[in-house]
Every structure is written in C-alpha cells, then in structure tokens.
Amino acid sequence: MDDMRDKLYIVSGKTYLSHVNNEVHLYGLLHQLASLARHIKDGQDFLHLVETATRYGEIAEKKLRGSNIPGQYLASGDPQDLQSLLDKELDEVEAFIEEDGPWEN
C-alpha cells in the first residue's frame, strides 16, 4: 500500500467539523486535567483529580468507539492498519457518487 500520508483525501464538511470538534473537546479535557494537577493543595484536590481523570477517560473511550478506528492502529500506529476503515469510508463515498451525485437529474 502506498504511504497514506502522501495522498489527498476529500471529506465532507460534516466529517471535518466533527473531527475538529472532537480534537477541541479532547484538548479541553487535557487542559483541564493539567490545570487541576497544577493546583493540587491537599488530598481532596487529589481525589478530585483522580475522579475527573477517570470520567475523562470514559469520555475518550466513548469518542474512540464512535470513530471506528481499529484497535490494532492504536497499538501499532501503522497507517496500514487503517486500511479497513479507509475502504469502508471510500465505499460510502462511491455509493454517494453513484446514488446522489450532483450531476444526476
């Protein structure tokens, strides 16, 4: 397989916006955790940090499950492990073009 990083991809505006919003949300969670960690003064603050980190971990897991990213990619980081996801998304694009393409009357 060719290097995926060298290819251009077209995504829908909805997909792009969803991706950006997910990144912003996850950044916000990490930023808040860092802030909580910097301001720990006592055991109560530490417990709050642990509870918050646990909840944010659950949010991250839910987002990951909704992304359809293969678990193997998380372990390997190898773009080839994304091939099944890419194939599925390209099938969806091809179906759209065949059924709903803007050039059909």
Image: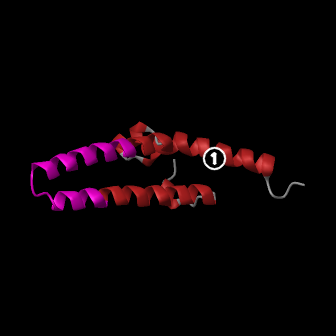
Q: Which amino acid does label 1 sit on?
A: Leu
Which SS class for mark 1? helix
Q: Main secondary structure of the magenta part?
A: helix
Q: In which quarter of the image is residue 72?
A: top left
Q: How many neighbours does mark 1 have within 10 angstroms: few (below 14), some (14-19), or many (20 or more)?
A: some
Q: Quadrant of residue 89?
A: top right
Residue at the spot x=29%, y=59% of the render?
32
| Residue 56 within the segment the image draws in magenta | yes
Residue at the spot x=59%, y=42% of the render?
87
- Residue 102, horizontal then vertical, whole percent: 81, 58
Residue at the spot x=55%, y=60% of the render?
17
Identify which residue, 34 or 48, lies in the foreground. Answer: 48
- Residue 69, horizontal then vertical, whole percent: 47, 42
In the drawing, does residue 34 fall left or right of residue 104? left
| Residue 78 within the segment the image draws in magenta | no
- Residue 19, horizontal then vertical, whole percent: 50, 56
Task: Name the residue tied to disc 1.
Answer: 90
Residue segment shown in magenta: 31-60
State the quadrant of the C terminus: bottom right
**How many numbered discs sit on the rendered protein?**
1
Residue at the spot x=32%, y=44% of the render?
55
Q: Can residue 10 be seen in this view?
A: no
- Residue 84, horizontal then vertical, whole percent: 53, 39
Identify which residue, 76 or 64, lies in the foreground. Answer: 64
